[in-house]
Image: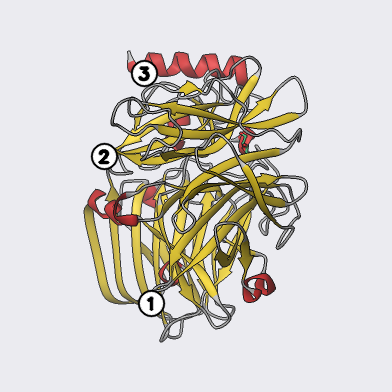
Amino acid sequence: MLIWQTFVDWAIEFTLEMPQSFSTLEPDLLRPKYHFTARRNWINDPNGLVFFAGEYHLCYQYNPLGNIHRNMSWGHAVSPDLLHWRELEVAIAVEAGVEAFSGGAVVDWHNSSGFGLGDAPPLVAAFTGHHTGQRLQDQRLAFSNDHGRTWTLYSSNPVLDIGESDFRDPKLFWHVATGRWVMLLVLSHGHKIQFYGSSDLKTWEYLSDFGPAGSSAGIWEVPELLELRIEDSGESRWMLKVDIGAGGPCGGSAGQYFIGQFDGTRFTADLSSLEAAPNWIDGGKDFYAAIAWSDAPNGQLVWIGWMNNWQYAAQLPTAPWRGAMTLPRTLSLRRTASGHGLVQRPIQQLETLRTDHQQRSDLRLEGRLALATHSTALEIKLCVALEEAAGFVIELGQHARVGYEAGTHELYVQRDAEDFSADFGGRHSRVVQLEGGILELRIFLDASSVEVFADGGACVITDLLMRAIDPSEFALTSSGGVLRIVQMDVWTIKV
Ligand code: FRU
């Protein structure tokens, strides 16, 4: 029954929505096990991330009718732990020709909006109204008084309309020092982030602009502003993130950030951050549109991105689903020689999903070592001393590998070309220096994606792998001499 239903779903999607050639007959071999995907249909950016009453809410750009980017609505899922997700009804649907583009959500603790009922605070979401019939984007509110189970559109929408066609992706937060709400959003073609302030989330006053700065190779999208802790210090600094729709370092879309100060009105980037710009968030090709959860427990800052690239998002050979989120990552800053760099770490609770542990330690490798696993949902933790080795490669099947080259200090993910897009294949690398001759990596493989964390989270490479992979082919191979495996742990990740 289940198999039949899956086939029917797939066949319907294939007939109605597949835009181009389609080669994979076993689509669910590509479906990740511990990354979020919608049961069916298209998803893109994470939206409305908020923690309330023991639940993380993950809304996302969603097409309820198929697996192409159309009918943009807010799909919705909830989780107690950011690991186990339950999909709910669509939170915000298309209304009278106005699609619900990206945005954020907050808990309105003191009911400043007046949307609350009784003592419980309402959840308030801000999203972009994308008018399908005219060149206009405006900002709108929706609220919920039942833990996000149903959402009501504010009767006086829009709350912000400046007559622009590409003015979008509002993110809300409470600025403690000035005691007011702040909303930031982008003027996509002007390469500007605009800041607005409000006491009630309904009436917005213009505060300031930031940009153009860094890369303006593509339109600006999905801004985020967070006050991050600087590791090993009692200090913090603000990170302003904005994505570019095209022209990223690996081709296509990508995210960049600036470090600086925010005084409640204006963001001022540090000179060192502007000089180093563009500061790319990810060394891979598939990390986009990340935003963080509001009100996460213990003041934690955790964000999640859409694991994709606009260059080929519409061509990915999966059905009836299309699109996945990255792992949730905690954020902090680290001092560098010239300023501050962003640090991302997979959320710690992922360690509770580890099973089937294999460990090798103190092994001198010259040649090939099979990983001996049966799963394509893995965490590999590797600590190696390069010694005489010129490098090593972790083969993830025949079409993708993670590797390191001692000569150039390059850590990379390489994936073969695929038929569905000329932009997919390639090698995506970052320079990572050895520390005392040692390299430590955490690699998360999940059927059709790989995320590599190095340098304690200062370097991340996120890439899709759109090919069914065979775990019997996984191996670690040294090149040009002996590689000393100080320790290698391999776990199956089970949700
Ligand atoms: C980013 C983006 C946003 C927009 C949404 C539309 O990926 O283009 O700027 O709000 O996706 O789905």
Dot placed on the residue nearer the N-terminal end, 3 or 2: 3
Whereabouts is ligand 1, in terms of quadrant? top right
Is the residue at mark 3 in contact range of ligand 1, meaning its CB lies under 8 Å from it?
Answer: no
The residues bearing labels 1 and 3 have C-alpha atoms spaced at a distance of: 54 Å
**Label ID, residue 54:** 2
Where residue 147 appears, x then y in whole percent? 33, 29
The amino acid at mark 1 is: Ser
- As rendered, which of 316 and 279 lies closer to the eye? 279
Note whether 198 is above or below 255 in the view shown.
Answer: above
Residue type, label 2: Gly
Q: Which mark is residue 359?
A: none
Q: Quadrant of residue 408?
A: bottom right
x 28%, y 50%: residue: 492
Q: Quadrant of the N terminus?
A: top left
Q: Is 481 above or below relative to 277?
A: below
> Which residue is nearer to you in this view: 92 or 145?
145
Q: How many marks?
A: 3
What separation in Å lies between label 3 and label 2 (alpha carbons)?
A: 34 Å
Q: Residues within 10 Å of mark 1 (few under 14, many from 20)?
A: few
Marks 2 & 1, CB-CB < 8 Å contact: no
Q: Residues within 10 Å of mark 3 (few under 14, many from 20)?
A: few
Between disc 1 and disc 3, whose residue precedes? Answer: 3
Measured Cα–Cα span from mark 2 to mark 1: 30 Å
